[in-house]
C-alpha cells in the first residue's frame, strides 16, 4: 500500500487524495445505491500522467477504477468494497484540443463535460448531437466507455457512431494514439471500437476525436397527448415516414411518468390534458422554414386529431418553450428518485415488438407485483425503453426483504425482451449490477471471446475489476 502511494505522489502534476472525507463523494454513485472504498483518489492533468499512474499500478498490481462524472446507474463508476484500488478521475483533463469547422470534428480530452462540448460545437455553428439528462455533469470519457445513447440516436446514432478516433492508455501504461478524424479507414482491425462500451475494463480513454454536424437552422419541437399504445406507435411510424431524415427525436413518457415529473420537479409544467395514456415528444430539424414544418406536421397528424387519438398538442414557438418541453423529458430521473424506489430496466426490443413488450410487461407486473406502478420512458425511434416498476417508499419497505424479489422481476422482464429478440441493456451498460445477466443472456462462446480480449489487454485483471465480465 505504501509503495503505490509513494509512487503516485512522485508523479509530476498528479493530485493524490487519501483523506476519507474528500474521497467520500467519489465512493458512492449519484443515486446512492452503490458504495465502495479506495486507497486513494488521483486526478491526472494530462495523458502522460495517466500513463505513469497505470504503469505504477501495473507494476504493484494495484486495481484501477476509472471515473468520469460518476453518473452511472449500473454501479460501474465507483470502486469495489475491497479498498485495495485507486480511483482514477479524469475530471481535470478537460481541454478542447482542436475545433475544426472545415473537418466537422472536435478533439477533446476525456474529462470534458458533455454540455461544454455541445457549446463548443455551437460556437462554430456545428452540432454535437449527443444529449442526455446528465449532460451538465457527465464526461465524454464516460459517455464513450458506456457507449451512451441519449435522445438523438434515431437520427445521429449512439456514441459509437459519433467517435472518429481515440487516445487510450492501456493497463501497463502504454499509450495508443488513434486520434484520427478519418471517416474511412479500412487498414486492419478497428481498435477504436474495442474500447467504446468497454466500461474502462480494457483501457482508459484519455481523449477523443468526435464527429460534428452542420447545425440545423430550424427546429420544430412538439409534445402530443395520445390515447392508446397502438395509436402512439402508429403515430411514430407516420412521423418517420412524413419527415424522412428530419426526425431527430421521438421520446415517450407514460401518464405515470409525466405525473411524477410534474409532482416532484420544480418549475415543471404541462400545457396539455393530464389524463393521456402517453406523451410523445417530437423534434424535427432541418433547413425547411418552421411555418412549413408546422404545416406538414399538422397534415401528418390530421387523421389522428379527427379520431380523438391525439387529445391535444403543444408546439414550441421559441427556444424557451422548446427548453421547457425538453426539461420534462430530461428530469424524469430526478422525479423518480423523489417518488420512491424505482426498479429500472434498460431494455431494447425491435421496433415492431415495442407494443407487445409493453403489454406483456404490464400484465406480468399486475399479476406478480401489483404494488408497483409501471412507469415508462423511452427512445421510441430506437426501441429503447426504460421500464420502471415504481414502488412507494412504504411499499418498498414491505417487499424489499422478500427473497429474490428484484432478481425475479428483472429476469421476468428481461426474458420477455430476450424472447422478442431484445436485450437487457440498451444504453446504460453492464457495470456491476448486470454481471449475472451476462451469464444468463450471453452464450458461453460470446463470453469466452470477451474474456480473451480482456486477458490480452489487461492480463493482471486490474482495470475496473468486477465490471462487465462475470
Image: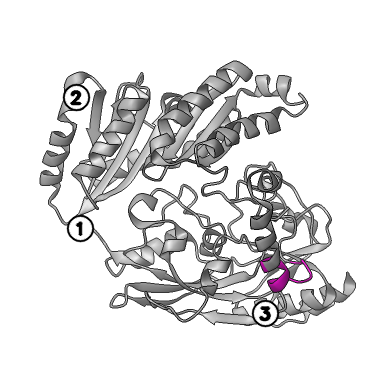
**Compared with residue 70, is residue 61 higher up or lower down, i.e. above or below?**
below
Mark 2, Cα crowd under 10 Å, few <14 / some 14-19 / many 20+, is some
**Mark identifier at residue 51:** 3
Q: Quadrant of residue 343?
A: top right
Measure the C-alpha gap from mark 2 to mark 1. 29 Å
> What residue lies at 21% left-to-right and 26% top-to-bottom?
304
* Left or right: 456 in relation to 163: right
Measure the C-alpha gap from mark 3 to mark 2. 60 Å
Q: Nearer the viewer, residue 363 or 431?
A: 363
* Count of number-bearing discs: 3
Bounds of the magenta segment: 453-462
> What residue lies at 57% left-to-right and 68% top-to-bottom?
194
Q: Quadrant of residue 418?
A: top right
**Mark identifier at residue 217:** 1
Residue under label 2:
305
Mark 1, Cα crowd under 10 Å, few <14 / some 14-19 / many 20+, is few
Residue 81 at x, y percent in the picture: 81, 52
Mark 3, Cα crowd under 10 Å, few <14 / some 14-19 / many 20+, is many
Mark closer to the observer (2, 1): 2
**Mark identifier at residue 139:** none
The chosen color scheme is: one colour
Q: Nearer the viewer, residue 116 or 442?
A: 442
| Residue 310 is covered by the magenta coloring | no
Residue 255 at x, y percent in the picture: 41, 24
The first of marks 3 and 2 along the sequence is 3
Q: Secondary structure at mark 3?
A: helix
* Left or right: 262 in relation to 442: left
Measure the C-alpha gap from mark 3 to mark 1. 42 Å
Amino acid at each position: 500500500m505504501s509503495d503505490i502511494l509513494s509512487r503516485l505522489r512522485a508523479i509530476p502534476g498528479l493530485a493524490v487524495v487519501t483523506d476519507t472525507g474528500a474521497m467520500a463523494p467519489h465512493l458512492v454513485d449519484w443515486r446512492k445505491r452503490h458504495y465502495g472504498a479506495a486507497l486513494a483518489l488521483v486526478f491526472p492533468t494530462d495523458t502522460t500522467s495517466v500513463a505513469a499512474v497505470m504503469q505504477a499500478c501495473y507494476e504493484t498490481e494495484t486495481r484501477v477504477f476509472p471515473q468520469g462524472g460518476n453518473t452511472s446507474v449500473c454501479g460501474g463508476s465507483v470502486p469495489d468494497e475491497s479498498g485495495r484500488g485507486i480511483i482514477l478521475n479524469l475530471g481535470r483533463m478537460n481541454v478542447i484540443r482542436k475545433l475544426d469547422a472545415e473537418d466537422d470534428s472536435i478533439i477533446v480530452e476525456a474529462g470534458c463535460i458533455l454540455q461544454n462540448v455541445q457549446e463548443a460545437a455551437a460556437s462554430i455553428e456545428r452540432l454535437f448531437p449527443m444529449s442526455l439528462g446528465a449532460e451538465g455533469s457527465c464526461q465524454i470519457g464516460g459517455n464513450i466507455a458506456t457507449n451512451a445513447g441519449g435522445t438523438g440516436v434515431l437520427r445521429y446514432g449512439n456514441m459509437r457512431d459519433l467517435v472518429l478516433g481515440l487516445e487510450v492508455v492501456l493497463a501497463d501504461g502504454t499509450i495508443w494514439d488513434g486520434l484520427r478524424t478519418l471517416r474511412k479507414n479500412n487498414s486492419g482491425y478497428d481498435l477504436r471500437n474495442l474500447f467504446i462500451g468497454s466500461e474502462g475494463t480494457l483501457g482508459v480513454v484519455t481523449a477523443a476525436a468526435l464527429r460534428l454536424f452542420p447545425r440545423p437552422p430550424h427546429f420544430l419541437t412538439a409534445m402530443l397527448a395520445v390515447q392508446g399504445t397502438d395509436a402512439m406507435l402508429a403515430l411514430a411510424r407516420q412521423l418517420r415516414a412524413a419527415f424522412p431524415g428530419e426526425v431527430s427525436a421521438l421520446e415517450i413518457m407514460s401518464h405515470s411518468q409525466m405525473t411524477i415529473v410534474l409532482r416532484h420537479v420544480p418549475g415543471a409544467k404541462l400545457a396539455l390534458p393530464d389524463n393521456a395514456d402517453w406523451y410523445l415528444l417530437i423534434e424535427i430539424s432541418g433547413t425547411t422554414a418552421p411555418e412549413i414544418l408546422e404545416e406538414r406536421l399538422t397534415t401528418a397528424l390530421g387523421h389522428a386529431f379527427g379520431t380523438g387519438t391525439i387529445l391535444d398538442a403543444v408546439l414550441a414557438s421559441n427556444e424557451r418553450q422548446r427548453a421547457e418541453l425538453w426539461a420534462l423529458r430530461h428530469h424524469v430521473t430526478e422525479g423518480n428518485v423523489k417518488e420512491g424506489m424505482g426498479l429500472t430496466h434498460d431494455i431494447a426490443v425491435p421496433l415492431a415488438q415495442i407494443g407487445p413488450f409493453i403489454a406483456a410487461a404490464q400484465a406480468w407486473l399486475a399479476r406478480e407485483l401489483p404494488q408497483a406502478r409501471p412507469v415508462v420512458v423511452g427512445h421510441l425511434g430506437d426501441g429503447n425503453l426504460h421500464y420502471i416498476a415504481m414502488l412507494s417508499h412504504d411499499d418498498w419497505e414491505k417487499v424489499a426483504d422478500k427473497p429474490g424479489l428484484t432478481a425475479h422481476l428483472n429476469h421476468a422482464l428481461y426474458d420477455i425482451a430476450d424472447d422478442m429478440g431484445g436485450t437487457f441493456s440498451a444504453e446504460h451498460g453492464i457495470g456491476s449490477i448486470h454481471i449475472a445477466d451476462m451469464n444468463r443472456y450471453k452464450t458461453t462462446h460470446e463470453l469466452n471471446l470477451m474474456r480473451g480480449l480482456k486477458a490480452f489487454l489487461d492480463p493482471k485483471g486490474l482495470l475496473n475489476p468486477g465490471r462487465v465480465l462475470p
